[in-house]
Amino acid sequence: MWARSASIDISPKSPAVLGANGLPKVPVSAVADQLEANILVLGRKDASLVIITLDLLYVGFRLRYAIETRLLGVVAPDRLFLAATHTHRAPMVDVSKPELGHFAETAFHSIVDRVSDAVRELLNSPARSVTVESSHGNHSAGVNRRKRRRFVVDRHGIRFNSVIMAPNRNGPNDPQFRRLRLVDGSQVMAELWSTALHPTGFPFRERMSADFPGYVRRAIRDQTRTDLPVLFLQGFSGDIRPLTPTNKLGLRRLLQGRRFAGFSPEQYDDWVAQLVTDVLDAKWKSVTGDGVASVRLPVDRDSFVVGGPPPSEGWLHAFRLGDLAILGVPSEVVTEYSSSLVPVPPITDIWGVGCIDHVWGYAPTQAMLAEGGYEACGFCSHFGVESVNPRVETELRDNLRALSSLIATT
């Protein structure tokens, strides 16, 4: 396999409103740690697959289109895989969701320029022959955030038998992390890794940060003693968040039950250090099979939500490296959909990835739609949509199966 890779700084040089940090109109200038775009180019120049992960909440249709346009004639749209790490401490470059953060236009244009220029430069650089290795393991950093309470008193009034955001240790979870690295001789030249975990734990709302993907990235670089590109792909994490402390015993807890509280800086350091330790404890094996493939399956907004701002069309995007396949979905997919990730021979390993391209909203299950809660309906006003498509589970599971079969035979 032939590969080229690069890592670039996309931290804004001027204040920018962040996405989903709870301050949708407040520009932020402090940078706690560097925001990055990490780029991996696989294959020969005339048939390259370009994979880009960006430390952003979402990519959004406008950023996707702008990068596509700048690379027109160089990279075909169906060979360009764009994913956000989903950090909640990065400039808001998705213009369609102002309630989550006002559009950071200066940061947007800077990212388009830097990423497009870096891809063009990579495509004009020599490719390296690499072998591919993968690894799997588990961590204890996340917890399901959907908890049914028989009785709740909060700002919405008195509610009975409601699903709230609270730690549910017995709820569905996917604690697995997945790693893939490309090795040139004895040197690691790039790595991809993925897990299903919302990057919402960073304790400072008014500082930019890549959150835990950035911490793990630096640790991998320290371990390899190289400044290699490290691409993080967000898993099916729609209902999984960091296992933070909970609210203290008192009247609020009596009325609302055990709820999430934020990390203190010291607690966050301990939490992310344990995650780093777990991820670095990898046992590698060779990825078998030959070649690189990429396919897209068209989907429309109505497959996920009812109503909302453009675009009305999008894609599920899968790529394959030998016998390993990665399926990307333009949605915040809840972890229950991991059960649909069934390898189709010759595929032996399959990863599910959310937050690619333009995200219309969450993809809950049928059971969640009946229960309610943020992932089923609470997010809709923030995303500017009316409701979730009641057939979202049937359609998404059908599409995941179709995409698995398609990438296996491409």
Image (spheres, helix red, strand yellow):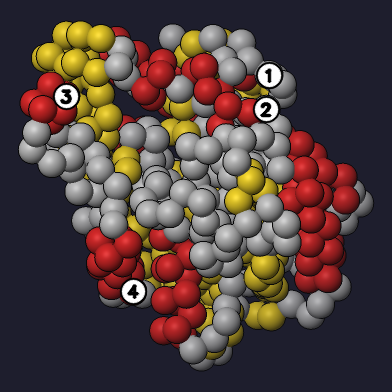
Q: Relative to 98, is 188 on the left or the right?
A: left
Asked which quadrant contains residue 36, the reply is bottom right
Residue that mark 1 sits on:
309
* Image height of 354 relative to 157, above or below: below
Tell me the element at label 3. helix
Q: Amino acid at mark 3?
A: Gln
Q: Looking at the image, which residue is at 47% across and 14% down?
A: 388
- Of badges 4 and 2, nearer the viewer stands 2
x, y percent for residue 180: 46, 66
Residue that mark 4 sits on:
280
- Of badges 1 and 4, nearer the viewer stands 1
Residue that mark 3 sits on:
256
Q: Residues within 10 Å of mark 3 (few under 14, many from 20)?
A: some
Q: Looking at the image, which residue is at 81% across and 77% down?
A: 125
Q: Amino acid at mark 2?
A: Ser
* Image height of 298 relative to 26, above or below: above
* Image height of 269 relative to 59, above or below: below
Which numbered disc flags the more N-terminal residue, 3 or 1? Answer: 3
Disc 3/disc 2 C-alpha distance (Å): 33 Å
Which numbered disc flags the more N-terminal residue, 3 or 2? Answer: 2
Q: Looking at the image, which residue is at 47% across and 75% down?
A: 218
Q: Relative to 190, is 13 on the left or the right?
A: right
- Of badges 3 and 2, nearer the viewer stands 3
Tell me the element at label 4. helix
Q: Looking at the image, which residue is at 69% across and 69% down?
A: 8
Disc 4/disc 2 C-alpha distance (Å): 37 Å
Q: Residues within 10 Å of mark 1 (few under 14, many from 20)?
A: few
x, y percent for residue 195: 38, 53
Q: Residue furthest right?
A: 73
Residue 79 appears in view: no
